[in-house]
Amino acid sequence: MSGILHLNDILYFPVPKNIFNVGRCPEIKGSPLTLYLYILYLSQERTKASIYITNEELQRITGMSKNTILNARAVLEEAGFISFSKGSGGYTYILLNPETAKVLVNSLRGEYPPLDFNSLQPDQLRSYYLHHAKGEVNEGDSGIMVRCPFHDDRSPSMSINLDNGSVWHCHPCGISGRLIEFETRMAQAKRETITTSEAHKRVRAVLVSVGAIDATLGLPEAKYEYHNGNGAVVFEVLRYKGKKFRQRQPDTDKPGHYVWKVNSAQKVLYGLPAVLEAELVIICEGEKDVNNLRLLNLNDAKERPVAVTTCPGGASKWRASYSQALKGKRVVIFPDQDFAGRRHAAAVEYALKGIASEVRVCHFPDGFKDMTEYLGEHGATDLALLIDGGWISVPTAV
């Protein structure tokens, strides 16, 4: 039971064999099994290994009393199937691998940006520390004061600076550190010795359980490479299920590795080398639309390849530098058929005034929201009629 399975767009948790193996741990049946299966179900629905469930919800769904749930929860913890922590009105349940007692991976065997603790926002950091805090909490201008969990603290004596990478300091203990040191000491307080890697996993599990970060993205559905004018990859956009996007750039110091930030990356149009070579350029609103339109292998009236492009980030993300790549060219804009798409098209059209030689904004017939939908029922000939004016030479079928 190493993680979550993903088959035919359905998520599955493997059922631990320990449930049936009475030789290794207590047999799980009755109310503990009912509770465990409900936790598995919610974990599948939310694609999280850590979930918060209210006491009221558990009693209502399982039909069990408060004491029965309490006993069932204790059996599951003792057997190594779950760990849990008390919250306001309920509990956060964390699924464990009963063979290793480690938290189940929060993934679908996918590729994820590593968690950069230095990039966490104050609200995310506050959620993490409040998860561990007991009793009184004092809010300050740049952080919070909490009762130190590492000694018998009767009043808040640990200061946590949320604006400086989560630096914490306990004045009576004389100790300080950051997230990893805090999680490591939390383990030591429970007489555990953990590695830095394990501390990272536990911090991530807490952040997931309190809703501070996404539990999982899964395998990317598509990868879109952005090249500079020389053809070198400057950054990539990864598309995940649910139209979630993440960007990364090649790590120049480690070939084959990536930096999951693109602040320093050169921002360019998608397919820039082809854009620079073409005389006619079609702009869509997303990389998926661009790739589908490219399959038509369109040529302009002089039988030169038509370039298809978009800007990173989608609607409302056009930059002045993108316009310069279209200087002197004919440009066709196909916006998505919604308010954001039409506004984006108007902004791009305005930005290209005096730069592109001609600009046309073309709209799809009713019933089609974007290029991908339109191409599901139409081909190059119909698209050429939408553009009109003889700008497109319909290619012969291959």
Image (cartoon, rainbow, N blue to C red):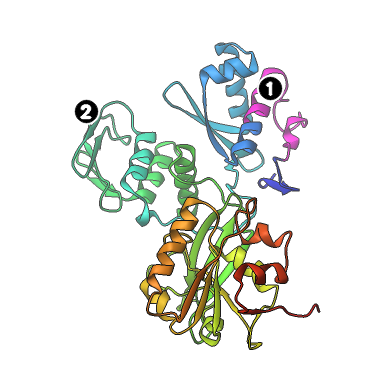
Q: Is residue 18 highlighted in magenta?
A: yes
> Which of disc 1 and disc 2 is earlier in sequence?
1
Q: Position of residue 177 (x, y in %)?
A: 30, 50
The stretch of residues the image draws in magenta is: 14-39
Asked if 145 appears above or below 354 in the picture, the reply is: above
Numbered badge on residue 34: 1
Numbered badge on residue 200: none
| Camera sees residue 128 | yes
Asked if 268 appears above or below 245 in the picture, the reply is: below
Do residues under tags 2 and 1 come within 8 Å of each other at their CB atoms?
no
Q: Position of residue 261 (x, y in %)?
A: 42, 65
Element carrying mark 2: loop
Callout 2 amino acid? Ser
Hey, which residue is sitting farthest right in the picture? 398
Q: Which residue is mark 2?
A: 155
Q: Nearer the viewer, residue 273 or 45?
A: 273
Taking the image as shown, residue 99 lies to the left or right of residue 347, namely right
Residue at x 59%, y 49% (from the top left corner): 242
Residue at x 57%, y 66% (from the top left corner): 287
Taking the image as shown, residue 258 lies to the left or right of residue 23, namely left
Callout 1 amino acid? Thr
Count residues near mark 2 (Cα–Cα under 10 Å), then give few for <14, some for 14-19, many for 20+. Answer: some
Count residues near mark 1 (Cα–Cα under 10 Å), then give few for <14, some for 14-19, many for 20+. Answer: some
Asked if 346 appears above or below 295 in the picture, the reply is: above
* CA–CA distance in space, label 2 to label 1: 41 Å
